[in-house]
Amino acid sequence: MSNSAYVLAYEPRSGKSLVVLGMMEILSRRVERLAYFRPLVSGDPADNAHIQLVRDRYRIKATPEQMVGMRLDRAQQLIADGQKDILFGELLNRYHALARDAEFILCEGTDYSGLGASFEFEFNAGLAIHLRCPIVLVGSAAGRSVAETMRTLRTARASLEQLGDTVAATFVNRASAAQAEEIRAELDLHPETDGPSWVLPETPALARPTVAQVAAAVGAEWLHDPGDAAQRDIATYRVAAMQLPNALSRTAEGSLIITPGDRADILVGAIASVISEGFATPAAVLLTGGLEPPPAVMRLLDGMRRWLPPILLVEGDTFTAAMGVEGTQAVLTADNTPKIAAALGAFESSVDIEALLKRVAVARSERVTPLMFENDLIEKARRDRKTIVLPEGSDDRVLRAAAVLARREVASLVLLGKPEEIATRAATLGVDLLTTKIIDPVSSPDRQHYAEVFYEARKHKGVTLQDALDQVEDVNCFGTIMVHLGDADGMVSGAAHTTAQTIRPALQIIRTAKGVSVVSSVFLMCLPDRVLVYGDCAVNPDPTPAELADIAIGSAATAAQFGVPPRVAMLSYSTGDSGSGAAVEKVREATRIARERAPNLSIEGPMQYDAAIDPSVAASKLPGSSVAGKATVFIFPDLDSGNNTYKAVQRSASAVAIGPVLQGLRKPVNDLSRGCTVADIVNTVAITAIQAQAGAGAAE
């Protein structure tokens, strides 16, 4: 039987989905076989956006149909026929079928949209008892005084206790900043009756529909491919019927501008306001009447594609379009990364995660899945926020990642580049950078001091002070000096720069840690049931035995830093004493040096890959070894074998490869691939922050 919890709202529009998402996020860090169950849903489960979000984000194998007990219309019919026993019996059977392969099931109660409020409350409470689930109670403070909020909450708790339910935790959602402190104080006064409780702030972004949702609601078509901008939030809408000067003065930030399609002046003015300072930036433009702009205007728009907000066209009139926009409900979907980050940021910043997990009795799984590992990175980075500098501040992927990182409070960020350019691009993308700091290396008041630091570090190479002044205008050099001086704790670059451009300043200024002869790299290879460490797959083409020993020791330390117990296999085409040759002898000598330098390290070599990872092969090729068959850290003899192997495993085994993670520097600098995704940047920043927490290397 699996462990479980039942998220029960005691009223409509409580923000229950936010609590479910937050709980699934923290459970996914601990539980390998995590499941999700909805007793009742309206319509086809496959079309339910919330079910799809949970299934996609948390990589749940069950189908949407398997995650649902019954459709709402069938439940209504059973209740009308007086067959509640059959209703509960079928729901229990569906739940237990899901539970057979699960370690933990999170159940989400009904939405108060079809059975009647009082009946639904009792239905959810009764089902939770049948399923033996402790209840996570959710209510809302929206539209209520603090006294009304507390009275409603306590009435719901008392009712559940009378029915025989166990309330493990309570959430008061959608509280204003003023309400939140008062509610927390009131809850603290009566811990014996209110139990473990948390207050979640109202998050306006979660109530805002996206451009894509509005487009679907009003039946609009796109005049151009909006890309990720389709997921921008619409804060409000404005009907532009006035002349352009008056319309511009009434446009709000993040608004949808609704205007007849023959108003080219309004359309061009809306786009110009994105580029020009001092004007509110619209989220999108909706053209009505089925009137497409004339060819000359379309050519003009093509020339401004970088700044172009999404432009939609609808057949109906302006009034009908505005009513359709007004009635569009926000829905959290799996592809809206910024909105998910906002939701999780609100949850994680308000909740004592360990206390909540203890209340619902969640035990950590022994094995680590890729999802558990990736989510654990975020959790570790959040525990002690570090400052990470991102030199490529105007790159779209970096801006999107920065918004996610800021929302989740993973790190304090510094973007390098021209502030006005970054702000304009962020506004065009609909990215909220919150309090993210932006520095222009060219105009920075620290430029002179940084140049002097660079000059002192490189004057023995013939660098003059003027050379240094010019050099620190380079964003990677400026960012590296920030890390060197402690103005930032780490740096992540490479989305638009080569590995050499990223690493060279670090080697020149930060340099290697004490006792380390070479900077190297590892990939954290997240396989379906475990996480392995591969090194070096990105930096050193043909390391010497001493360098290979350094790579092995450094890779073991990196593995331990990220929760992987280090058992190091020194790879070769031969296992033990079975073969000979220069390549084998290099690995044998590297193993000897590593054992000498780190006598407590569990290390073995030379060893073939199959002997390192397969216990049955290890038993025949290297019996009695403490590493063979259960290695977690794989050290390749050269870049050729390492780079090819990690890519082969990544593609053929559907592994998630996180990295390269650089090691051996006194302070952390990490390199991105120029083909990196937003998720890659988020993961790499989290890794860099964790390295900074641990000191990254033994500073001199």
Image (tube, helix red, strand yellow):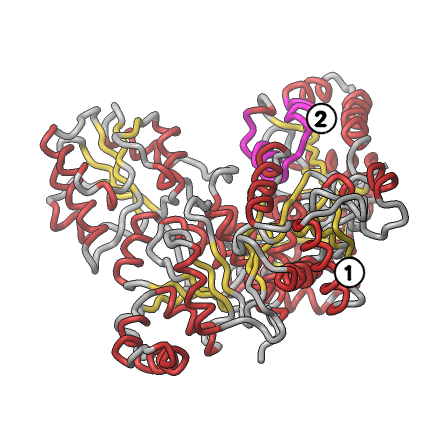
Residue 331 lies left or right of residue 312; in this view the side is right
Of callouts 1 and 2, the N-terminal one: 2
Q: Is residue 233 left or right of residue 243?
A: right
State whether residue 211 is above or below residue 642: above
Q: Which residue is depicted at the point 29% across and 81% down?
A: 465
Is 281 left or right of 349, judged from the image as shown? left
Helix, strand or loop status at disc 2: strand
Residue 122 pos. (x, y %): 74, 37
Q: Amino acid at mark 1?
A: Thr
Quadrant of the image containing the C terminus: bottom right
Residue 696 shown in magenta: no
* Secondary structure of the residue carrying numbered label 1: helix
Q: What residue does disc 2 label? A: 69
Q: Amino acid at mark 2?
A: Gly
Across and down, in percent, residue 351 comes to 64, 59
Of residues 325 and 460, the one drawn nearer to the viewer in this rendering = 460
Q: Name the one closer to the observer, 134 or 686.
A: 686
Residue interval drawn in magenta? 47-72
Q: Is residue 53 magenta?
A: yes
Q: Position of residue 544 (x, y in %)?
A: 61, 60
Say which of marks 1 and 2 sits in front. 2
Q: Quadrant of the N terminus?
A: top right
Residue 347 appears anywhere in the view: yes
Distance Cα–Cα, label 1 vs label 2: 33 Å
> Residue at horizontal 28%, vertical 76%?
469
Q: Which residue is mark 1?
A: 193
Closer-to-camera residue (519/683)? 519
